[in-house]
């Protein structure tokens, strides 16, 4: 990817730019509202006519206020940490007005070359208005060759009004030593949520996910897909929980590929508190399918190359 | 030239009561440019033989020579790089891989759209509908099977082995496939082995091999072997499938 010069003089280093491209696909000043946070401070913030980004006064973080019926706008709010030992808890609140249709690109990159532990705990709360539609994309990425750990503990709460739609695409593929992700969604009548979580852990990394989806409104629905790959000595634990409190549909699907000495647990819970709630959970953990491996080897690939292709496809 | 010398493959019986011989002391030579059809009863060892040639299974005895070189201990990858390929009887599916990327991986390079289309057309698939579809559970059995055959077409192989390419394929695509194999049969340098129970594919063969109980039961030019099969199994006047009848 070509990284053009940002129009703003943000004193962004090449590493900063690399991380912004990696976590938020930002290769230039983006269109629309954005906020870049670096080493515990907001370095640039831009609002638009329909989207206002406001710094919180009582605690670290921002409020993102999207006017009702805003259509097809984007918000970028990446966070980068490049100093070793930075530890922060940041509160971001999203207020998405009735009938709005927006895409929010978040993401956090930690580049740790030192010995101090760097940690970003992002607490995101979404208030999605009636019939509003949100696509939320979040990438986590870690790099740097220091001994200091790179830690991210995101908490996401999604309050969904009647008829609203939310699509969440959360990716963590590389370099994060420890993650404890908590997600909670509360759905009103006819609200729909689609969550795709993709995760790869390696080395001695640990990843834990708690997810609760409360389907409170009639006609609400949820589809939760988790695809993960555990390599080396890494550990993954999932606790997805779908609760049907009304006539609703929920489908939770967890697929994992396990390699080397990794450990993966999937501990699903599904509950129905209404006779017309339909809640389904499917989970599978297994090695890479050997027929797939063999097939790619018959194309002339080595076993390692074949594994890489299969994992890439699986996490796509 | 492919030479199999006293090739054996046996597995231990599950109850520990000795060994099960799946391929037994098999000798076979396939010359360059030959189009060979292997047929025979279910469980006769045809797919196992193909897997031994590709390196997917390791023989418990004997030798495999390819162009004079002993490849018995070579990996699948090494054999693939010698230009050997195998289209599975039951091809796997790939989540997240499109038909186009699978064809590109087979070819070992990024294939332009029109080239992909050529290969898909050869197996009777309307390419534009398929190029960007994933090779996952959304494809039908016959579609996956034809994509598998197309991946072999996309490779420049010296020895291509197709395992029951006709299985699960509709009559229209089958006609297309027979035409495609007809062109392959004309090639003078590359060898093709097709495991098949279909008369119309056997008709294309230079040579027919009947494999039963892990041994070559009959081997010879089509004009010799085919009439024998006819007399053994009765009339082939209609499109006949040996599968159901060989016991
Ligand atoms: N790894 C194995 N362990 C045990 N038995 C095996 C193994 N591989 C093959 N077999 C057995 O060997 C025999 C030959 O199998 P193979 O798949 O080669 O038959 P085939 O001729 O291809 O049959 P079909 O026409 O049904 O495809 C079968 O009885 C099969 O069950
Ligand atoms: Mg077979």
Image (cartoon, coloured by chain):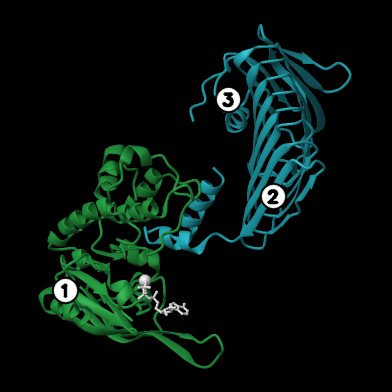
Please tell me whether mark 1 or mark 3 is closer to you in this view.
1
Give whichever of B25, B107 is nearer the camera. Answer: B25
**Which residue is drawn at the image coordinates 35% and 48% (left, top)?**
B103
Answer with mark 3 or mark 2, whichever residue precedes in sequence: 3
Vertical position of residue B102 compared to residue B184: above or below: above
The C terminus of chain A - image quarter: top right
Q: Residue furthest left?
A: B223
Give whichever of B156, B215 is nearer the camera. Answer: B215
- Few, some or many C-alpha atoms within 10 Å of disc 3 (few <14, some 14-19, many ≥20)? some
Mark 1, residue position: B207
**Which residue is drawn at the image coordinates 24% and 49% (left, top)?**
B122
Please tell me whether mark 3 or mark 2 is closer to you in this view.
2
3D distance between C-alphas at marks 3 and 2: 36 Å
Q: Position of residue B26 (x, y in %)?
A: 29, 85
Q: Secondary structure at mark 3?
A: loop
Mark 2, residue position: A281
State the hue of chain B: green
Q: Position of residue B239 (x, y in %)?
A: 22, 64
Note whether residue A112 is visible: no
**Which residue is drawn at the image coordinates 78% and 18% (left, top)?**
A63
Give whichever of B161, A176 is nearer the camera. Answer: B161
Note whether residue B160 is visible: yes
Q: Secondary structure at mark 1?
A: strand
- Say the numbered circle drawn on residue A26: 3
């Amino acid at each position: 990817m070509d990284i053009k010069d940002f129009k703003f003089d943000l004193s962004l280093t090449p590493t900063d730019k690399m991380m912004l491209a990696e976590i938020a696909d930002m290769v230039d000043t983006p269109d629309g509202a954005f906020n870049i946070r670096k080493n515990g401070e907001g370095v640039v913030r831009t609002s638009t006519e329909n989207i206002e980004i406001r710094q919180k006064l009582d605690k670290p973080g921002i409020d993102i206020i999207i006017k009702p019926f805003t259509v097809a706008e984007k918000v970028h709010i990446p966070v980068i940490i490049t100093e070793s030992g930075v530890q922060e808890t940041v509160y971001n609140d999203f207020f998405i007005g009735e009938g709005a249709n927006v895409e929010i690109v978040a993401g956090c990159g930690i580049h740790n070359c030192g010995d101090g532990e760097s940690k970003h705990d992002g607490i995101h709360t979404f208030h999605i208005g009636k019939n509003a539609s949100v696509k939320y994309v979040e990438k986590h990425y870690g790099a740097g060759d220091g001994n200091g750990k790179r830690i991210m503990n995101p908490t996401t709460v999604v309050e969904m009004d009647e008829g609203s739609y939310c699509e969440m695409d959360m990716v963590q593929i590389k370099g994060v030593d420890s993650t404890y992700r908590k997600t909670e969604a509360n759905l009103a009548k006819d609200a729909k949520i689609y969550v795709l979580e993709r995760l790869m852990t390696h080395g001695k990394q640990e990843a834990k996910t708690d997810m609760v989806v409360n389907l409170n409104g009639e006609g609400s629905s949820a589809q939760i897909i988790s695809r993960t790959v555990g390599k080396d000595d890494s550990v993954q634990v999932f606790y997805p929980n779908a609760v049907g409190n009304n006539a609703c549909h929920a489908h939770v699907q967890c697929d994992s590929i396990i390699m080397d000495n990794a450990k993966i647990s999937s501990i699903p819970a599904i509950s129905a508190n209404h006779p017309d709630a339909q809640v389904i959970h499917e989970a599978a953990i297994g090695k890479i399918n050997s027929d797939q491996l063999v097939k790619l080897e018959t194309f002339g690939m080595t076993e390692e190359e074949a594994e890489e292709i299969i994992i890439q496809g699986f996490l796509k | 030239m492919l030479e199999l010398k006293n090739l054996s493959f046996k597995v231990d019986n599950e109850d520990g009561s000795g060994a099960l011989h799946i391929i037994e002391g098999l000798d076979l030579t396939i010359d360059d440019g030959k189009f060979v059809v292997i047929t025979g009863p279910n469980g006769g060892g045809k797919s196992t033989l193909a897997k031994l040639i590709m390196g997917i299974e390791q023989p418990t005895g004997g030798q495999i020579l390819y162009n004079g070189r002993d490849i018995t201990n070579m990996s699948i990858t090494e054999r693939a790089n010698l230009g050997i390929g195998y289209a599975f009887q039951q091809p796997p599916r790939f989540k997240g891989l499109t038909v186009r990327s699978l064809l590109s991986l087979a070819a070992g390079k990024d294939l332009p759209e029109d080239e992909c289309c050529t290969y898909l057309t050869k197996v009777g698939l309307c390419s534009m509908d398929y190029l960007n579809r994933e090779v996952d559970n959304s494809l039908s059995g016959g579609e996956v099977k034809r994509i598998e055959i197309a991946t072999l077409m996309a490779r420049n192989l010296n020895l291509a082995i197709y395992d029951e390419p006709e299985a699960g394929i509709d009559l229209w695509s089958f006609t297309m496939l027979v035409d495609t194999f007809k062109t392959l049969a004309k090639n003078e340098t590359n060898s093709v082995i097709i495991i098949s129970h279909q008369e119309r594919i056997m008709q294309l063969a230079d040579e027919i091999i009947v494999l039963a109980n892990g041994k070559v039961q009959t081997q010879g030019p089509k004009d010799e072997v085919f009439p024998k099969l006819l007399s053994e199994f009765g009339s082939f006047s209609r499109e006949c499938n040996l599968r159901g009848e060989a016991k």
